[in-house]
Amino acid sequence: MSANRVSIILPTYNREREIGRSITSVLKQTHSGFELVIVDDGSTDGTADIVRGFDDTRIRFIRLPANRGQSVARNAGIRSARYDLLAFQDSDDEWHPDKLARQLEVMHGHRDTPVVVYCDMNRIWRSGERSYHRSPTIENGRILDPDKNQYMVYGLGIQATVLPKTIVETVGGFDERLRCLEDLELFIRISKRFAFVHIPEPLVNNYETIGVTSNRQNSLRARRAILFRYLPRVAAESPAFVYTEAAFLWRKFRRLRRRRIK
């Protein structure tokens, strides 16, 4: 397998209105050596019809029998991947035409050491306004950013990354128990063992749409799971972060319980 070829994993669920934009931006990449593995996580709308409308032999379409979440869909795509490099696209986002080419150029400068290459993004809000999203600077081995009092990898979008498949396999893939923030948790595991290389340019348009991350309860549950999973490491670096995060989660879950009672 050529080192220049990339398996792009695109999970989707009921995205018939947005997925065409996402697929088109991948097919327009100046680097054409890739396969696009689209994993339909049990959609009930016309998503499959939109995908089948694209006539490109680089597209492979996998349909899962039921909706089980992005982690399951992404892991299914990874298992099916034919190439040694992985990239991830979200079904509502858009890549700039030279995204893959720019990242592979950086990747080739680290041939002897497996690294994650990532970029910045433009945020496109529902109002149509745009803002610049600078991805975090990731210090290998730390779990928290002392300046931001947040996880070191917080704010790194999965769609902004390219990495060797061996890295994902080494750390065990996405945690299928998480229905949200599964990319954050994966990056925490990766950052303990592998280096990240930052391209400080926006090569992705990240659109604000209604999706997994907008589900408040799933997000809170994922934050709680991540905090408890990495509690010893987090507490060793910042007991204050543990207190702040635990207090925040306690307040939010208490409010949710009150709403259910009413």
Image (spheres, helix red, strand yellow):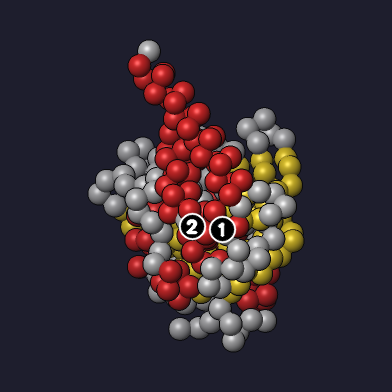
Q: Check disc 2 and report the residue beneath it.
A: 232
Q: Position of residue 36 (x, y in %)?
A: 46, 63
Q: Is residue 31 visible?
A: no
Image quarter of the C terminus: top left
Q: Exactly how many numbered labels are in the figure? A: 2
Mark number, residue 236: 1
In which quadrant of the rendered image does the N terminus lie? bottom left
Q: Position of residue 126 (x, y in %)?
A: 63, 32
Above or below, 33 against 247 in this view is below
In depth, the one of 83 and 250 nearer the eye is 250
Per the model, the C-alpha gap separating discs 2 and 1 is: 6 Å
Indicate left or right for 40 with 17 as reference: left
Is residue 247 toward the left or the right of residue 12 in the image? right
Residue visible at 63% across and 76% down? 107
At horizontal 61% and vertical 46% (from top left) the residue drawn is: 240
Rendering coords of residue 201 (x, y %): 74, 59
User: In the figure, residue 179 lies in which quadrant?
Assistant: top left
Instruction: Using the image as rendered, state which of residue 106 and residue 230 is in the foreground.
Output: 230
Res 127 quadrant in image = top right
